[in-house]
Structures are given as C-alpha cells and as structure tokens.
Image (spheres, helix red, strand yellow):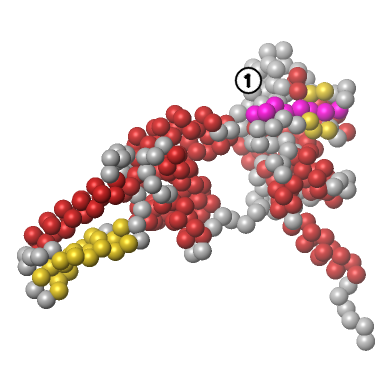
C-alpha cells in the first residue's frame, strides 16, 4: 500500500510492505510529480525485495500445482482441491502471487459470502490456496504464505468451521427410512448402517471384496485414509448380501440393471428421506449411526470402533462420538432424578 501526503508545502511518500512502513520526502510541491516519484520508489523497493527471482502469476502457479501436486494426493482430496480451484480462479487469475495479500483474500471471502457460501466451504477454498502458496514456497517462487496469516487472524473473528455434526438415526427413523426406500436403495442403506462403510466405499464395492464364508467385507486402499481394512458383517448385512442377485454383466455389488455402477445415492436417498417424513438426514449420518450402534448396543470399545470405521487415529473417533458422553450423562440424570432430599 502506498500513498502521498503533505508536510508543509512538500509532498512525502508512505509505503507499507510486509508489516514495515517506509516514509521519505519526495522533494516536490507538485502532487502529480509526487505520485510519479512514489511509483518509481515503490518499484525500486520491489526490485530490491525480489532480486533475481521471477514474478510468478497465479495462473502459471496453479497449473504447476495441478500437474505436480494434485497427483500426490488421495483421490478424494484431489477432487476436493479441484472444486476449490474452480472457485479460486475467477478471483485470482492474472494476479502476481506476491501481490496477493489480506485485501485480495478479504475480497474473495466477501464475494463467496455474497454467493451464499458457508464458512467451512470458504475455509476449504482458502486452505487449497494456502497449499498452493506452500507449493510455490518449496519451489522458491515466493517467500511467505499470506493465506496462513489471514486464516489465523480470521479464525479469531468469525471464519470458523461448523461444529461437528451429531445426527444419527433412531431405530424408528431407520425403519421409516427403509420402508420408503426402493429397490437397491434399501439394501444400500442397510449396508451403510451395518458396515459403516463410506459412500464411495459402498459405491465401488465389488463381489470379490465380499467374503460370506468368513463374514467380512474388505475395502481397497482407495479410501479416505488410503488404508485397506476388513469390516465384519453383522447378521442382517450377511443376509442382505447373501440374497442379493449378482449381475452377470457387472462385478459391482450395487449396480443398475445394465451392470453400470451407481455413481451417487443422492436422488434415491433424498426421496426416501422425504417420503419417510424425516428432515436434515444426510448419507454420512448412516455411517455415524453405525458407530453409535457399535458403541451403545454392541458395547464395543472406542479403539475397536475406530478400527471398524477405518479412522486415521482413535482421536478422530473420540472427537466424532464425544457427544454420546453428554447424552449418556443426560440419561443418567433423568433416571436418577434431580430432586433434593428434605
């Protein structure tokens, strides 16, 4: 940021750069001449700061980021980054990386909010941009990551992730949902609740991953954590998989009549939720329902549920299901009563 101001009859210049403020006399009484000298001074400071390093545009940096960095990520993370990149490009294309600072980042946040985007989504987009800056730092294309500083400051002023979701289905809600689910959707919902497999894990499930003799299902390494695991089958899931017909034209467990795999459960699941009279139920709530049932009904230990669900660490399981402890305390209070003896 640069500006001119007067001291007496002479114009002075002020330049703010990297948390430092520079001031000097521009030695002229003409404002237009002062502004010209200010631009020259600003250019000289920039040349000193950059030395022989190239000034890189966002456009070139993001292309290198896509080509060289995204292939190193897990497929799901790469897909999420691709969505964020599409959101970032309109705001930052044509800009030099070293010209992207708090103002540009604030403008992006404001724009996204006017588009009705939630704080968690904005944070994901900025986190992607931060990764690109870190990538550029590693290549010695730029010094410093302004996005990290911006996110840290904004987290103290309202730009925060939403609290963890705690929704899970009661037995009555599950029965209503299954009653209104049609065809393969009913089987998919049942398997999601009984196995706790993630949506993509179920969508891509093949029959060679199902072992009915030993009562297990195995995932591939193409999971959120990149680690394969073996999931035990509860009796109901065993029954569902045991009676499901196999399509001779497909290796997928859940597929259309022509053998093509399902790519999403959104439409059929949304219709079942609506017809069952339920509200605010998402597919991932079925996985959370599985975890809650394992803890509450099957009395499994936290580390066992962590292994079952394929969490990266038990800390993830602890934070995800911490709300159950509050529910258990409330139940305990209700049962024992809160009255005081006379």
Residue 127 falls left or right of residue 321: left
Q: Mark yes or no: residue 115 visible.
A: no
Above or below, 55 relative to 204: below
Front residue (pair 328, 188): 328
Quadrant in which the C terminus is drawn = bottom right
x and y percentages locating residue 323 in the rendered image = 74, 57
Q: Secondary structure at mark 1?
A: loop
The majority secondary structure of the magenta stretch comes to loop
- Residue placed at 71% from the left, 53% from the top? 319
Q: Mark yes or no: residue 1 visible.
A: yes
x and y percentages locating residue 305 in the rendered image = 80, 43
| Residue 15 lies in quadrant | bottom left
**341 falls in the magenta region:** no
x and y percentages locating residue 105 in the rendered image = 39, 53
- Residue placed at 88% from the left, 33% from the top? 235
Crowding at label 1, few (<14), some or many (≥20) Cα neighbours within 10 Å? Answer: some
- Residue placed at 80% from the left, 45% from the top? 303
Q: Which residue lies under the disc numbered 1?
A: 260
**219 falls in the magenta region:** yes
Over which residues does the magenta segment extend? 215-222
- Residue placed at 21% from the left, 54% from the top? 42
Quadrant in which the N terminus is drawn = bottom left
């Amino acid at each position: 940021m640069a500006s001119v101001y007067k001291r007496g009859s002479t114009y002075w210049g002020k330049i703010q750069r990297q948390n430092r403020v520079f001031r000097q006399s521009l030695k002229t009484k003409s404002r237009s001449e002062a502004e010209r000298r200010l631009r020259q001074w600003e250019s000289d400071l920039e040349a000193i700061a950059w030395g022989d390093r190239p000034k890189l545009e966002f456009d070139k940096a993001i292309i290198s980021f896509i080509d060289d960095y995204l292939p190193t990520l897990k497929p799901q993370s790469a897909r999420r980054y691709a969505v964020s990149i599409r959101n970032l490009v309109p705001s930052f294309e044509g800009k030099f990386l070293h010209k992207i600072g708090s103002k540009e980042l604030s403008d992006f946040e404001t724009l996204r909010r006017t588009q009705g985007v939630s704080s968690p989504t904005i944070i994901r987009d900025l986190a992607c941009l931060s990764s690109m800056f870190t990538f550029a730092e590693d290549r010695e294309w730029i010094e410093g990551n302004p996005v990290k500083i911006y996110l840290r400051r904004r987290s103290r002023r309202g730009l925060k992730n939403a609290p963890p979701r705690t929704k899970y289905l009661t037995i009555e809600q599950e029965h209503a949902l299954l009653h209104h689910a049609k065809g393969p959707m009913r089987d998919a919902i049942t398997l999601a609740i009984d196995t706790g497999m993630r949506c993509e894990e179920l969508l891509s499930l093949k029959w060679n991953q199902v072992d009915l003799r030993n009562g297990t299902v195995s995932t591939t390494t193409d999971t959120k954590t990149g680690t394969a695991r073996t999931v035990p089958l509860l009796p109901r899931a065993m029954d569902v998989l045991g009676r499901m017909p196999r399509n001779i034209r497909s290796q997928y467990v859940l597929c259309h009549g022509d053998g093509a795999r399902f790519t999403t459960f959104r439409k059929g699941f949304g219709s079942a939720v609506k017809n069952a009279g339920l509200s605010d139920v998402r597919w991932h709530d079925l996985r959370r329902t599985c975890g809650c049932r394992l803890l509450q009904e099957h009395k499994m230990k936290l580390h066992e549920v962590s292994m079952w669900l394929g969490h990266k660490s038990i800390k993830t399981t602890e934070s995800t299901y911490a709300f159950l402890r509050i529910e258990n305390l409330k139940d305990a209070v209700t049962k024992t009563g809160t009255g005081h003896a006379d």
